[in-house]
Amino acid sequence: MPTTLLIRKDRLADTRLREAPDTPLAEGQVRVAPETLALTANNVTYAAFGEQMDYWRFYPSGEDGWGIVPAWGFGRVVQSLHPGVAVGERLYGYWPLASTAVLQPDRLSAAGFREGSPHRAQLHGVYNQYQRCCSDPFYAADSEREQAVLRPLFATSWLIEDFLADNGFFGAKRILLSSASSKTAYGTAFFLARRSGLDVVGLTSPRNVAFCEGLGCYSRVLTYDALDTLPAGEPSVYVDFSGDAPFRRRLHERFQESLKHSAAVGATHVGHLGGAKGLAGPPATLFFAPAQSAKRAEDWGGAGFQLRLVAGWQDFLGHVRAKQWLTLRTHAGPQAAATQWQAMVAGQVDPREGHLLAWR
């Protein structure tokens, strides 16, 4: 029986597995079986900002108070009533944590298609694009599992660094990154480290200091309680991957007007989320990767943007492999997915590991 993992929207650690038969396809639809999905802190961010950023709307659960978290990865077409999409095709894209997904392909090309279901028409286009693996410039069979885990996080990292550079780093030389052991944070640090003259400071918990230092992409690594050792008068930028509201307030109060920009990106510290009103210094501004992506596609053209992004991916993946930063773990079946989700929400995940869900 097809199974879906439901998440309680107001208590993210609460899950339920729902079994229900697949609904018949309408003309023009396809059914895809997700095969290799990544579960990272990124997915927790989707849930934490599910209402604010419309993440719950991609795959509506149909049940009040419960949502379906989307995840990036690979799936195979198992049924098709669309002449342009063949059974057996493998696709990269944005899937539900479920046995199957129904898509309505639109704007087809050799590269892929857009998901054209009416309920997704107002949602951001980046999440509605599905790439055919046979023509995807990112795709290589020998790196598929790494792509599932790192590709969306890499894209966010690359775009954060590009956004900061595009804005002259807001006049700052010191970039502070919280949750420095998270993959999106150290991906950002990897690209920042290639810029001369920047002091890239990783902020993390004591247990992750050695790991972050071993990455070799931070100028220095500090524990959260060592924040006050940094000179407060130096122009700085804060990139927040943790979502930890009390720490964000403390950081703003320390640096005040020396803080030139404060970017809210992630929510790895689910237990400490909160509002950002009344902060000293600049407001905390949500960084939305698709907006920077759209800007650069306009600046460089779609093909130029894609070339730069793929080159960045190959560079980053080569470094991850050379430094052996990542050990991949696969969790088979819906119950294993639920267990791993709860561990992710609780922050009980080794930063050296990347987690994959094999639904079937």
Image (cartoon, rainbow, N blue to C red):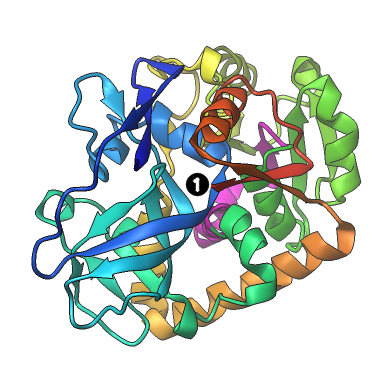
Residue at position x 39%, y 57% from top? 33
Q: Position of residue 111 (x, y in %)?
A: 37, 82
- Please give left or right for residue 114 compared with residue 168 in the image: left
Residue 274 shown in magenta: no
Q: Position of residue 266 (x, y in %)?
A: 52, 35
Seen in the picture, residue 334 relative to 165 is either above or below; the reply is above
Q: Overall secondary structure of the magenta stretch?
A: helix
Amino acid type at mark 1: Trp
Residue occupied by mark 1:
359
Residue at position x 28%, y 74% from top? 113
First to last magenta residue range? 152-180
On-image quarter of the N terminus:
top left
The quadrant holding residue 129 is bottom left
Seen in the picture, residue 230 relative to 58 is either above or below; the reply is above
Q: Does the rendering let one see residue 264?
A: no
Quick one: which residue is furthest to the front in this view?
1
Seen in the picture, residue 253 relative to 112 is either above or below; the reply is above
Name the foreground residue: 230 vs 337.
337
Q: Residues within 10 Å of mark 1 (few under 14, many from 20)?
A: many
Q: Position of residue 107 (x, y in %)?
A: 19, 77
Name the foreground residue: 105 vs 123.
105
